[in-house]
Image (cartoon, coloured by chain):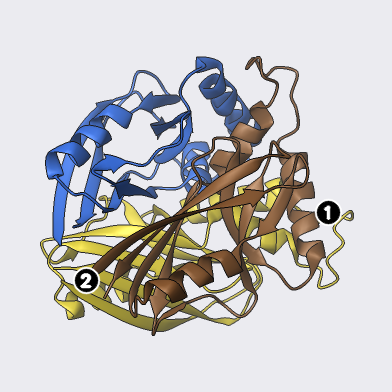
Chain colours: A yellow, B blue, C brown
Amino acid sequence: MTVQSSDFSVRTPQREALVDITHEVAAIVTAAHVVNGTCVVYCPHTTAAIAVNENADPDVKRDLLYCLARLVPQLREFQHSEGNSDAHVKSSLVGPSLTFIVRNGRLLLGTWQGILFAEFDGPRTRTVQVLLQGE
Amino acid sequence: MTVQSSDFSVRTPQREALVDITHEVAAIVTAAHVVNGTCVVYCPHTTAAIAVNENADPDVKRDLLYCLARLVPQLREFQHSEGNSDAHVKSSLVGPSLTFIVRNGRLLLGTWQGILFAEFDGPRTRTVQVLLQGE
Amino acid sequence: MTVQSSDFSVRTPQREALVDITHEVAAIVTAAHVVNGTCVVYCPHTTAAIAVNENADPDVKRDLLYCLARLVPQLREFQHSEGNSDAHVKSSLVGPSLTFIVRNGRLLLGTWQGILFAEFDGPRTRTVQVLLQGE
């Protein structure tokens, strides 16, 4: 059994963006030589999140951001003085942590799935933390 | 320590459905002879998700699907040409992956909790991936 | 490799509340002497959830609860006879389980992150289940 910890940075291009990080995570899995186990992808920020969704058609990402912005607008009732409560709420709706399965040395993702860093208060340079555990 | 990987299929009955998969997951846990550890339940599809909620009263599942449909309707502003962006959004709100605790050889679920495969673009035959890790 | 299981109780003060449980979880991590691995925090209740968000300014928690209540009101179309379907829906939106990374013997949290027990149908005494796995 092995446990391996790793970080990488993501530069997000605008206030709200879904940045594909599949290749970064997959490269960490390959380098770790874990054959079977788990891969935790963790976002240490409170105005961002980790999502999985379709990567093939960019309209899916656009529609997802559009719908989240419609669900959680900048409400005038919000009291947090930084004015980014909408980003904090979206962060908790999408969630900061996802656990993936590693099988036969590869990240087990569905055909259309990509791992997305969900930025809700950018542009910023963000950190993604990864933990691999397995045999 | 042991790592065990497993799949099963779910046939979803209509476009939107919450299908109870508790027994399938619990059977995998029992067969794996893991005493203490984790059980990752993963959905490899971008228009479905894994949820946990009450199984006792079917009205809870009905109300959950009703509320999700109300929150994320088929918006005319959606641009994804397949016309199922609502399902993609719901998938990211509920999430593709949940990690359960295995204790004393059993899946640790609350009294009222069931594991639900959340279908948002069915009916389809779907796959659920499970990874057990522990001692 | 070690696997360690643990529980603690949370008393929630009102119907909807975000109770900081960071110290309870961090104390379990310290006591377990796991250096590198994962920490699963699990909510065995169907009207509550586990969240991560900013702990510094209490307005963030207030805005998060306000926004969730606005997104998921007590709809008259709900059929579940207990009258708490809003709490069941919020539970599935926020989610029952989060996996954290343990690195160098400490819970890896971002600067502003706290672990929050999200109560949607209190006040009650609730249970939180924790599983540590690592080396």
The 10 Å Cα crowd at callout 1, few under 14, some 14 to 19, many 20 or more, is: few
Image x and y of residue B18, in percent: 43, 26
User: Relative to C8, does residue A1 appear above or below in the rendering?
Assistant: below
Look at label 1 and name its amino acid. Answer: Leu
Query: Between C24 and B22, which is closer to the camera in this rendering?
Result: C24
Q: Residue A113 at x, y = what percent? A: 33, 54
* A118 left or right, relative to B117: right
Foreground mark, 1 or 2, reads: 2
Q: Which mark identifies residue C1?
A: 2
The image quadrant of residue B76 is: top right
Label placed on residue C72: none
Q: Secondary structure at mark 1?
A: loop
| Residue, disc 1 | A75
**C-alpha gap between disc 1 and disc 2:** 48 Å
Closer to the camera in the image, A92 or C42? C42
**Type of the residue with mark 2:** Met
Q: Chain of mark 2?
A: C
Q: Position of residue A32 (x, y in %)?
A: 19, 78
- Give the left or right position of residue C14, taking residue C107 as reference: right
Asked if marks 1 and 2 fall on the same chain, the answer is: no
Left or right: where C17 falls relative to A76: left
Q: Quadrant of residue A41?
A: bottom left
Q: Residue at x 39, y 47 (%)?
A: B96
